Amino acid sequence: MQLGLDFSLVEELVAGVDEVGRGPLCGPVVTAAVILDPLRPILGLNDSKKLSEARREKLFDEIREKALAWCIARAEVEEIDRLNILHATMLAMQRAVEGLQVTPRLALIDGNRCPRLAVPSAPVVKGDSQVPAIAAASILAKVSRDREMQELEALYPGYGIGGHKGYPTPVHLEALKRLGATPIHRRSFAPVRAVLAGVD
C-alpha cells in the first residue's frame, strides 16, 4: 500500500512496529507495537540505537505510561531456527500488533516489508528515525531485550552476553569456540553451526 506520507499528519490510531535482535547469535528476537496518544506527547523519541542507555530506560517507562496502547512480543530461539530469522521476526511483529489493547487503523513497520496483519500496514525504511510511534516501539523492544540478556548473562556466564547482547563480537565468538553453544544459541546461524559441527 503506497502512502504519500507526511508522518506528522498521519491519522491517529497508528501503530509503530519495530524489532530488536535479528543479528545476534543467541536469544529471542523481540518486537514492540506502540500507539501513541497525541494528547500526551513524549519528548525525545528517536531510534533506540541513537539514545543513551539511561535515556532509553527513562523513555521506556514514559512510553508505557503515556501510550494509548503498547505490546512487547517475541519469537523464541526454537522458532528462529525452525522458521529462519526473517519469518520469525515477522511472526513476532504480528504478535505485537495482535497484542495491542486498541486496534490500530494502520500499522507502520520499520524496514522494507510487512508481516501479515489484519489491519492495513506499510513499511517505512529507517522508520525509527522518522515516525515517533516506531521510535517508541524500538525503545520498548531494545530495553526489554537488553534486560533479558543481562539476566541470561547470570545463567550462562563466560560469554559476555550482558555486554554484547548476543551479537557476534570477537569476545562472543571466542567464548563460543571455547565453551560451546548454550541452549539459547541459534543453531541455524553459521558461527553456532560451525561450533556444533566441530569446524574451526
Image: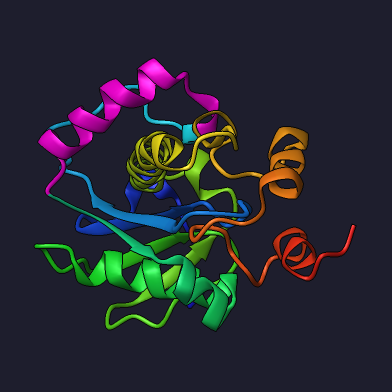
Q: Nearer the viewer, residue 96 or 46?
A: 96
Quarter of the view holding residue 182: bottom right
Report the residue at 61% width, 51% height from top: 24
Whole-percent x, y for residue 54 in the image: 37, 16
Q: Closer to the camera, 60 or 84?
A: 84
54 inside magenta stretch: yes
Position of the C terminus by quadrant: bottom right
Say whether residue 3 is visible: no
Verify whether residue 129 appears in magenta: no
- Residue 165 position within the rendered picture, expressed as x and y whole percent measured from the top left: 54, 39
Residue at image position (24%, 28%) is 42
Which residue: 58% across, 64% down? 186
Q: How many marks?
A: 0
Residue 70 pos. (x, y %): 19, 52
Q: Main secondary structure of the magenta part?
A: helix
Seen in the picture, residue 111 relative to 146 is either above or below; the reply is: below
Residue 181: x %, y % from top left: 62, 57
Numbered range of the magenta stretch = 49-68
Q: Is residue 112 left or right of residue 76?
A: right
Q: Is residue 185 visible?
A: yes
Q: Which residue lies at the image location 58% right of the left edge and 48% below the top edge?
A: 126
Coloured how? rainbow
Pick whichever, 30 or 132, lies toward us.
30
Residue ranking furthest to the right: 200
